């Protein structure tokens, strides 16, 4: 895979660049995850639920770097800092995680990460992609042709959280 997944632009110094994750991105990934859960999900989950969710994964770079061995990880960077990422389980055709820095939510970063993930899965012969999405993401995905397969309750640190299982058919698009 190419180091940079998106075309470059010489006109905007703070542009978003999409690429494979590097070990140096792991500390930023930990912070993106923590803040996306604690701040970004505030309108959808209680403080207790968000704390339990945020404590599922350590806020340490080494833990996130180790995940690079388990999942194909793509990052969105701005000024050489990770501001969003997606972990892809290519064997099973599913998104493991998708998080964007809260203040950048709604700007298409998550959508672009998903587009790159879809392309990678298509190249690997998959016909569909799946995700277990939070309450804050489900509506956005459904607007982008993801099919809601149902609500689930998942326990995290003694708290029940609602999530949704979604699936999208993959179709090759000429560019």
Image (cartoon, rainbow, N blue to C red):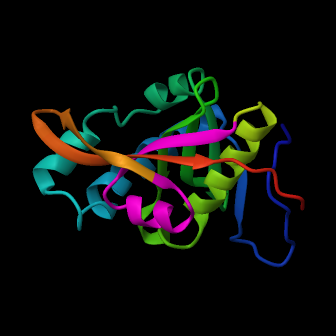
The image shows residue 136 at horizontal and vertical percentages of 34, 61
- Can I make out residue 130 in this image? yes
Q: Nearer the viewer, residue 136 or 29?
A: 136
Question: At 60% across and 33% down in the image, what residue appears?
Answer: 93
Question: At 27% across and 55% down in the image, what residue appears?
Answer: 38
The image quarter containing residue 88 is top right
Residue 132 painted magenta:
yes
The image shows residue 66 at horizontal and vertical percentages of 52, 22
- Can I make out residue 137 in this image? no
The image shows residue 74 at horizontal and vertical percentages of 65, 43
In the rendered image of this protein, does residue 100 appear above or below residue 121? below
Q: Nearer the viewer, residue 41 or 78?
A: 41
In the rendered image of this protein, does residue 36 appear above or below residue 95? below
* Count of numbered tags: 0
Q: What stretch is highlighted in magenta?
A: 127-147
The image shows residue 70 at horizontal and vertical percentages of 56, 21
């Amino acid at each position: 895979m190419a180091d940079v997944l998106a075309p470059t632009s010489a006109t905007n110094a703070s542009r978003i660049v999409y690429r494979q994750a590097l070990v140096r991105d792991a500390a930023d990934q930990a912070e993106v995850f923590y803040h996306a859960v604690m701040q970004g999900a505030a309108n959808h989950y209680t403080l207790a639920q968000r704390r339990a969710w945020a404590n599922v994964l350590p806020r340490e770079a080494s833990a996130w770097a180790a995940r690079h061995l388990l999942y194909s990880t793509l990052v969105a960077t701005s000024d050489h800092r990770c501001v969003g990422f997606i972990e892809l389980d290519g064997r099973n055709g599913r998104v493991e995680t998708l998080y964007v820095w809260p203040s950048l939510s709604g700007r298409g970063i998550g959508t672009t990460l998903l587009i790159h993930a879809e392309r990678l899965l298509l190249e690997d012969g998959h016909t569909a992609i799946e995700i277990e999405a939070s309450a804050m993401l489900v509506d956005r995905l459904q607007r982008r042709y993801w099919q809601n397969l149902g609500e689930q309750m998942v326990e995290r640190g003694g708290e029940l959280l609602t999530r949704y299982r979604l699936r999208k058919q993959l179709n090759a698009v000429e560019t």
